[in-house]
Each structure stands twice: as C-alpha cells, then as structure tokens.
Image (tube, grey):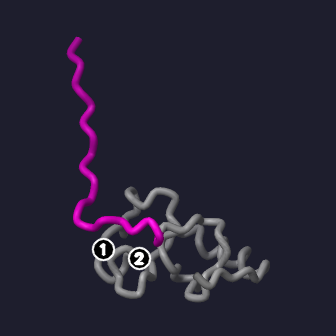
Amino acid sequence: MLYYKRRKLPRRCGVILDKRLKIPFNAPLHENDTDSTTYGCRQNNPDICNSNSLDRICAFTSDDSICKKPSKAWKKQYQELIKGKTFNEN
C-alpha cells in the first residue's frame, strides 16, 4: 500500500495582518459597524476567509479598515449586539 504525504494548502500571501484589526466576533460594537459591514475583521480564522486580502473588501487591505463582506452570521450577531447597545469607540 502506498502512502502519500499530505500537502498543506498554500496560504494567501501578500498582506501582513494587523492584529489590532482582528476583533472577536462577540466583542462590543464599534461605531463603524453596520449589519452589512464591520470595522476590522470578526472572522474566527481570517486565513480561511474567502475575502481575505481582497482589495477594498477585506479590512486588512482597505484604507478605512472596514470589512465589506462579513460572514453570514454577522447580521444576526449585529442584531443581538445592538439590543445590548454596547459600543466600543476604539
């Protein structure tokens, strides 16, 4: 029986991720958060995000640090966070 080495998939390269833009999914809302965009990246693992490093879409590459395509679960999470009305102004 032949065994093949499992190859790791290449990661998307190009952008050095700014750790300050990695924001926990359950963190309080930022003043720039909306139901369709987030300030920073709220993905649990940004490396596997389909929009990772895309110009003007990913928070790590956009000038305003806004993610234009958050996860599908973000809209529901936004509604739950807006009920608590806790805002983070950092």
Q: Is residue 80 magenta?
A: no
Q: Is residue 12 magenta?
A: yes
The front one of 33 and 72 is 33
Dot 1 or dot 2: first in sequence order is: 1
Residue name at image x 52 percent, y 79 percent:
38
Question: Does residue 1 sit above or below 9 in this rendering?
Answer: above
| Magenta span main SS | loop
Look at the numbered disc 1 and give the secondary structure of its residue: loop
The front one of 8 and 41 is 41
Q: Amino acid at mark 2?
A: Ala
The reply, left or right, for residue 73 in relation to residue 63 is: right
Which residue does the numbered mark 2 point to in the structure image? 59
For marks 1 and 2, give the one nearer the viewer. 2
User: Picture quarter containing residue 78?
Assistant: bottom right
Residue 15: mark? none
The reply, left or right, for residue 8 in relation to residue 26 is: left
- Graded by Cα atoms within 10 Å as few (under 14), some (14 to 19) or many (20 or more), the crowding at tag 2 reads many
Residue 54: mark? 1
Question: Does residue 48 sit above or below 90 in this rendering?
Answer: above
Residue name at image x 56 percent, y 88 percent:
32
Q: Position of residue 9 (x, y in %)?
A: 27, 46
Quadrant containing the N terminus is top left
Quadrant containing the C terminus is bottom right
Residue name at image x 48 percent, y 75 percent:
40
User: Picture quarter containing residue 51?
Assistant: bottom left
The front one of 80 and 87 is 87
Q: Position of residue 48 (x, y in %)?
A: 39, 57
Q: Which residues are magenta?
A: 1-21
Q: CA distance from mark 1 to mark 2?
A: 9 Å
